[in-house]
Amino acid sequence: MVALGLLALLLLVALVADWIMPHDPNAQDLLGQNAPPSATHPLGTDDLGRDILSRLIDGTGVTLLAPFIAVGVGVLIGLPVGMLAGYFRGIFDWLSTRVADALFAVPGILLAMAIVAIRGPSTVNVMIGVGVLFAPRVFRVIRAEVLAIRQATFVDAARTIGASPMRILRNNILPNTAGTLIVQCTVLLGMGVLIEAALSFFGIGVQPPQASWGVVLRRSFDSLTEAPMQSIYPGIAITLLVLAFMYVGDGIRESIGKEHREAGW
Amino acid sequence: MPESDISGVQDVTSPRVVAENLTKVFVTKRNAFGLPARRLTAVRGVSFELRQGEIYALVGGSGSGKSTVARLLTRLEKSDTGRVLVNGTDWTLLRRSALQKQRRAMQMVFQNPYASLDPTSMVVHLVGEPMIIHEKLARRDLDARVRALLDDVGLPSDSLHKYPHEFSGGQRQRLAIARALAADPDVIIADEAVSALDVSSQAKVLNLLLRLRRERSLTILFITHDLGVVRQVADRIGVLSEGELVEEAQADALFDEPTHEYTRTLLRSVPIMGRWR
């Protein structure tokens, strides 16, 4: 519940960012660089004299949106392929599993860098690339789940009343994988936050002057010795966000476990 | 023996279902090359027919192939040999889409009502699905039809928007029966349909099946290991042993003078109250 509340709060912050920022996130104050926390700058300023709190608030939207793009792409590819492979088995299953294995071997950061090299730096492009790498993770979980569900008696029951395979996939199998899918998504969202932060940290994700939590973290490294606290704030924010996604996933997993026990399969 | 005297609906002339020489071999182990290393013959050359309006009981111990026969009849499993004729149509020759249409005629009620109802489906969709599939029924009419069916099987007709977990075992089996009826079938296969239920629910569900047979002149294949139940309801009985149909007779005849040794063993093992005294 706390985790869900935190996510809701961050979403709210992202939506009303323009009104609650105490300063312009991009306004430089070269005389007030690396200022310690004060009444005017609650979290101090960075090495260009920009208000860190405002930059964090400004970056909330991108930081939240980026992992959703990646997970969205991953689900869009992984879910249907996983369902078809798990239900129909056969050559399609074999082939898609091999492709998934191959994609698993590709390091995410490397692929993201390759995409940036070809298409130029853009958060959307990079996160779509990350999403392609998320697809096999979704695929594997969904395929395994479908392999189990297709053995269930209620699937046999659906067949005996004359339901077509597509109908069974849509009405019986998809709803029964929903819980697993949501849990997997929250795990991937957490990973997505970290990957976005890492890419921004390397300077190939979000481009300046736009802020994201990863960008703020990167910036703080230039003056780590003078103002070490600067890297603490975005670090804490990123950690909390990842934890929030994880806890929400755990909560959903537990409530679903209960339902399954009641359903008796 | 309540209700067993209702056999006036029988029309002995036309078999609804004909099972001819059904055999099913399962591969239980494969070698390193993926070739079968060990086989299990679950059903061996089983032939029988279900006549219009009768209750045919298929009995046998665990592992005798009863459930496999049911799965072969409904084509949940493909048989290795033989044919299944339902209303004269050979189901073993049908392609998938044609089979989906034909399946309406023969419905199945499964043993475990906790597993045979999709936990994510609401009653109105669960019970109404055969009508959506086969009649392309409009949403509006669906509610009324499902209500009527629920009423028919003795469930409160206001449970349209409930989920299966809100019902007891006996009620769930009624839901399963209502779904089978929604397809307007000629034949219902009840695969151990009451053995997972407590005794009072068993009696209620059995009486429901008997009443439905009378009202809708259904043909029922009653698969069970419980000879006590069989005695109450069956017109004819087939005895399965290790995948083979070893004896087939009118119910009374079988109970009075079983001819096959396995049948005698089976009958001896029925615990009947009072027999020991």
Image (cartoon, coloured by chain):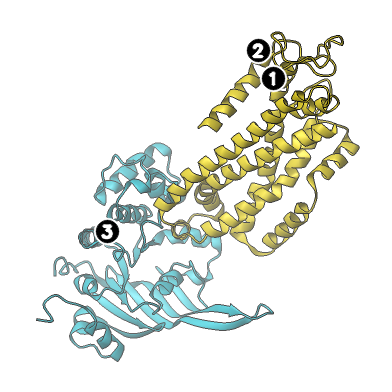
Q: Looking at the image, which is closer to me, B41 or B102? A: B41
Circle 2 sits in a helix, a strand or a loop, which is it? helix
Q: Amino acid at mark 2?
A: Ile
In the image, which disc is placed on residue A57? 1
**Chain cyan in the figure, letter:** B
User: How many residues crowd mark 2 within 10 Å: few (<14), some (14–19), many (20+)?
Assistant: few
Q: Is residue B199 left or right of residue A134?
A: left
Q: Nearer the viewer, mark 3 or mark 1?
A: 1
Q: Which residue has dot 3 on it?
A: B216
Q: Which residue has dot 2 on it?
A: A20
Q: Is residue A95 above or below residue A106?
A: below
Q: Would you identify the image quadrant in which residue B49 lies?
A: bottom left
**Chain yellow in the figure, letter:** A
**Cβ atoms under marks 3 and 1 closer than 8 Å:** no
Q: CA distance from mark 2 to mark 1?
A: 8 Å
User: How many residues crowd mark 1 within 10 Å: few (<14), some (14–19), many (20+)?
Assistant: many
Q: Chain of mark 3?
A: B
Q: Amino acid at mark 3?
A: Arg
Residue for point 61% across, 58% down? A86
Say whether residue A83 is visible. no
